[in-house]
Image (cartoon, helix red, strand yellow):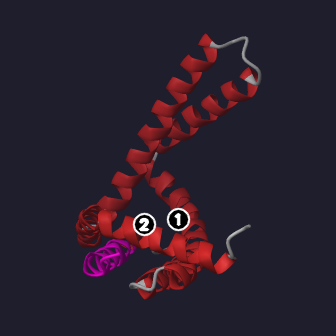
Amino acid sequence: MLPSQSSIDTKLSAALQKAMYDHWRLFLAEGIILALLGLGAVIVPPLAGLVSTIFLGWLFLIAGIFGLLFTLRARQAPGVLWSALSAVLALVAGGLLLWNPLQGLVTLTYVLTAFFIADGILTIVLAIAHRRDLSGRWEWMLVNGVIDLILAGIIISGFPGSIAWVLGLLVGIDMMFGGAALIAMALDARKAAP
């Protein structure tokens, strides 16, 4: 005999609540760190945008180097050509971001706009799912998703003059709201014993 769907949902909800309760301190620590990093980015947005561009450039460059090394060592593996092309693409992207970080900042601002739109929609959907499964502070996640969509609108409306500061400022704001959402959910999970 199969258990009913409501019985499965109840067990899943209880398991999720227990997991949140068991790890609320980790969520709280992550939220605090995220909020503090976001505050730093808001205080100095041009620097935060440039640092983000350079950091991403190094990540791509290192990923491309290791991708090529591993591809060359596995020359007989299937898909080696595609793997090599992917590694070269990462090398080129990293090199371009490091060669001209200011131009990279422009490109990343466009990518950030797309990210905020996608992340906003997904966070809103996740908040609605949390509302059904975990009642504690799902509203904060919903607000975070709406803020992401608002930030995307701000970027789009301010081009091209806002490129110098928008990346650092908006990433900082997003990190602060994401941190606040994690803090609120962690504190609520702490109070609600399973």
Which residue shows up at 65% across the image and 13% down it? 74
Which residue shows up at 47% across the image and 57% down it? 105
The reply to whether callout 2 and callout 1 are in contact (CB within 8 Å) is yes
Instruction: Out of 130 and 11, give the one closest to the viewer.
Output: 11
Residue 39 lies in what quarter of the image?
A: bottom left
Which residue shows up at 30% across the image and 77% down it? 193
Q: Is residue 115 above or below residue 58?
A: below
Please state the horizontal and vertical placement of residue 189, each as a whole percent of the image: 32, 76
Query: Amino acid type of disc 2?
Result: Leu
Q: Which mark is residue 167?
A: 2
Please say whether residue 176 is one of the residues in the magenta stretch: yes
The residue that disc 1 covers is 112
Please state the horizontal and vertical placement of residue 107, each as a whole percent of the image: 55, 57
Judge from the rendering whether residue 179 lies leftward or rightward of residue 113; answer left or right.
Answer: left
Q: Is residue 45 above or below residue 189?
A: above
Residue 159: tell me if it is visible: no
Q: Residue furthest front?
A: 1
